[in-house]
Amino acid sequence: MNDQPAPSDPAEARPPLADLRVLDLATVFAGPGCARHLADFGADVIKVERPDGGDTSRNVGWRDPADDQTLFWKFANRNKRTITLDLKSDEGRAHLLQLVATADVLVENFRPGKLEALGLGPDVLWERNPKLVVTRVTGFGQTGPYRNRPGFATVAEAMAGFAGLNGEAGRPPLLPPIALTDELTAVAAAFATMVAVHSGVGQVVDVSLVESLLQMMGPLVSAYGLLGYLMPRMGSRLPYTVPRSCYECSDGRWVAVSTTADAVARRVMQLIGVGDDERFATFEGRTANSDELDGLMAAWMAQRTAVDAVVAFEQAEAAAAIVYDMADIYADPHLQARGAVVDVGGMPQQGLIAKLSKTPGVLRWSGRPLGSDTAEVLAELERERDL
């Protein structure tokens, strides 16, 4: 684990979104994740929470022994200032509208219509700030017959086709054991938000969990529409590239293998001793004989330790990797060198999602206690009003 690296050139220290102000009214993971990505690259993100308990993520999952804050909260809301406003009160709404006048983006994930019910719909916000980008993250989007349904990531994972594909043949569908859809949607929303900001026009960015995950289905959407193809559950296999799976080695560790490129597949065939077998010379042949080839790959792996297997694949210029757990991630020298896990105020967490050579992002602090910056932010508003 590395400390967050500082930019090497002081002239390059100003992060690229330092002139952007974002109001984060969202809760839990996807919406706050969108704002987090903007904060990581310098945006002044002001997290607006309700006074009676704040964001739900403050009470989800493991807690940091140092301050009893949850790890979900501290990660999803790093680099943000946090204030409390009661948006059901006239005073709270007035303060928010003052902030809107100074902001570039507002991120929210209320059910459709809730912002309007508070008297804070986009039309009201644009009266204060015509160029405001309003990013709305929901389960199903702002339109359509399902718009008012509760939209959790689990629902999206079921309805976008992911759970139906995930799992072993003949076994039940599987949901992901991580907040997969939330994190994907966060990236999608951050991207779409910056496209809208770049447009220079105040507008709504409508992002849904279901459609964000549906993007990850790739050509499977087209394969059904054109060919009527429905991909079955296949465990770690794929229907168009063989071998592709996880294989147990002699030391009990597992190695993941991919042969998506034809040239790589031919080298793997040579490596496991079947390079002259015409059945395995093409994608079509390998797919038609997938069970036998998968068995040969499994037998080859079972005769070697995981490290030896990966070294052999590297020498053959083929793709394989040991299946890691978090302990492996912490120990890996490449991930250490890349700053994939960094220390942010005493809490280890993921580093920046991308590295910019001239205007890098900076991780300044983890999610802060409820209302930590309320007084400071409201004082700023008073000073700006007096100018």
Image (spheres, rainbow, N blue to C red):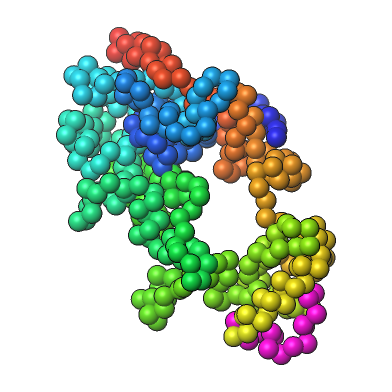
Q: Is residue 73 above or below residue 85?
A: below
Looking at the rendered image, the quarter that the C terminus falls into is top left
Q: Is residue 275 above or below residue 117?
A: below
- Residue 311 visible in the current orientation: no
Describe residue 245's horizontal placement relative to residue 384 as left or right: right
Which residue is at 52% across, 67% downward?
Answer: 168
Most foreground residue, 63 or 29: 63
Measured from the top left, where is residue 319 in percent x and y?
Answer: 71, 64
Measured from the top left, where is residue 114 in percent x and y?
Answer: 21, 37
Q: Report which quarter residue 260 is drawn in.
A: bottom right
Most foreground residue, 11 or 287: 287
Q: Which residues are magenta?
A: 271-287
Measured from the top left, where is residue 314 in percent x and y?
Answer: 79, 63
Which residue is at 35% across, 35% downward?
Answer: 26
Q: Is residue 233 above or below residue 149?
A: below
Looking at the rendered image, the quarter that the N terminus falls into is top right
Which residue is at 67% across, 51% downward?
Answer: 324
Outermost residue toward the bottom? 278
Most foreground residue, 135 or 50: 50
Which residue is at 69% across, 85% downward?
Answer: 281
- Residue 167 visible in the current orientation: yes
